[in-house]
Amino acid sequence: METTHSSVGASSCERWWNCPGSVKLVSTLPPQEPSEYAKEGTKLHAVAAYALQNHMTAASAAEMMINSGRFLDVMAGGIDFDQCDAVQVCIDTVREDLVKYRGAQLEIEKQFQLTSIHPDARGTNDANIGVFLKKLIVYDYKFGRGVSVEVEENKQMMYYGLGANQEGDYDEIELVVIQPRAIHRDGPIRRWVLHKSELLAFGEQLKAHISATSSPTAPLVCGDHCQKYFCPALAVCPAVKQRVGEVAVGVFDEPVRTLPAPETLNSNALKKLLDTIPIIDAYTKSVEAYALSVLNNGGKVEGYKLVQKKSNRQWKDEEVVKKKWPKIAVQTVEKVLSPAQVEKSLAEVMTKKEAVKIVEDFCFKPDAGVTLAVSEDPREEVRPKLESVFQPMSEKMKDDSIFS
Ligand code: SF4
C-alpha cells in the first residue's frame, strides 16, 4: 500500500473539499518544517498508539519510548503532565469501549487506500474497533485547544469511516472524535452513528470532489477553512491576497496611506475589521512561516536573515549539581533550581563574574532552532541546516519571490 503523503488524503479533506484549487497551489510550495502544533500532535498520537499496543498508561508508554532511544525525533522535548492526561483520555475511551463490547477487535493506526474512489485517496485511522455483527467504531484523536471539532457531518471522519469499512462488513458505523483539550458543549468525546448507505453516498461525493481538484480550472475559494484547516498556501495564495485587499478598500472606502487610530473608526468599520482579523492574522503568520522556510531552504528574503532562537541554560547533569551545591541548588528532592537561580545565590558570596564562570561549566544551551530577524539585528546570521529538515529549493522557487 502507498504510504507517502497524499495531496487528497483524509487529513486535508476539509480544505480541498472547500477549495479545489488548493491542491495544485500547495504542490508548488517548498517543503515546510512542521509547526510546533503538528510536532506535538505527531508525538501524542505516537504515545497513544504505543500505549494501546503495549497495554500501558500514557505516562509509562512515554517514559518507555524516551528511555528506549528509538523515538528520539518524535519524543524530542519530552512530554508533560497535561499532554499525558490528554493521551490518557483517548486511550481510556477506546479501552472502555473494548470492555463494553467484549470480543471486539482493535486495530491501531490502520492505513487504508480507497482505490475505487481515487488512487491517492488514503489515510490512517488512529484506532478502530469492530464489534462482530453489530458495528464498527472509528476513533480520531484531536489534541488542539483552539478549534473544537464537530463529529456530525465531519468529512475527515467520514473519509476514515469509509477507509475502515472498505469490505462493507458493518451496517452501522460510529465515528468518535476525542478532543480532551478544547471546550465543547458535548464534552471531550463526541459520537455520531450513521448507516453504511450514508457512508457510501458520501463516497460518491468524495469521488466528485477529488476529481474536481485535478481540473485545470479548479478555483481557489477563500473562506474560514483557510485558517481553520491550516492551509499551507495561505502566505502565497492569490485569493487570500485579494480578500485582504478588498477588506482594506471595503472598510476605508478609499486608498489608505496611514492606518487610522481605532477610536476614530465607526461601528460599521469596526465590525468589518473585527470580522476579518482571523484571516489577516492567519495570513501574516503564514507569511512569516513561509519566509522562514525560504531562508531555511537556502533562498533569500531581502532585509531578513536566520538567527538562533534564544534558549535557557539547562544543567548537564542535575545529580552532579545536587552534590556540588546541596544547600543552594536543591529545593526539594525532585526539584533543582535553575542555573540562573543558583548563579544569583552564589553571587551573594562571590562576585557575579566568578559565579557565572563556575556555573557555566555545569550547563549547556539546548538548540532551540532558528527564527527570522531583520538584517540589522545584532545577532549573528546562521546558515540553514539543509540536510536536516529541508530539501534544497528549486531554482524556480527561489525566483518566485512573494516578497518583492
Ligand atoms: S489559502 Fe484558502 S483560498 Fe488559498 S489555497 Fe488555501 S484554502 Fe484555498
Image: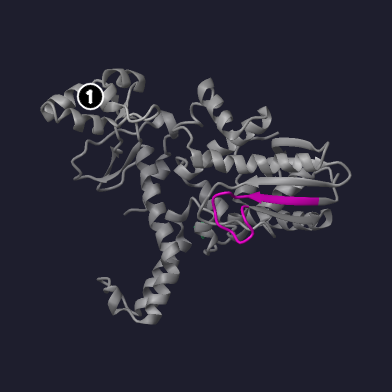
Where residue 222 appears, as percent x and y from the top left, is: 52, 64
Corner quadrant of residue 95: top right
263 or 89: nearer the viewer: 89
Determine whether 267 is above or below 124 in the image.
Answer: below
Residue 8 shows up from this direction: no
Q: Residue at x 72, y 46 (%)?
A: 138
Q: Is residue 400 left or right of residue 73?
A: left
Residue range (magenta): 173-188
Determine whether 103 is above or below 256 in the image.
Answer: above
Q: Residue at x 76, y 54 (%)?
A: 203
Q: Residue at x 27, y 48 (%)?
A: 302
Residue at the farthest right position: 133
Q: Amino acid at mark 1?
A: Glu
174 or 202: nearer the viewer: 174
Where residue 113 appears, as percent x and y from the top left, is: 72, 41
Quarter containing the C terminus: bottom left
Q: Mark 1 packing: few (<14 Cα in 10 Å), some, or many (20+)?
A: some
Where residue 249 appears, as percent x and y from the top left, is: 37, 75
**Does the magenta segment cover residue 180?**
yes
Magenta region, main secondary structure = loop
Residue 88 shows up from this direction: yes
Q: Residue at x 83, y 51 (%)?
A: 172
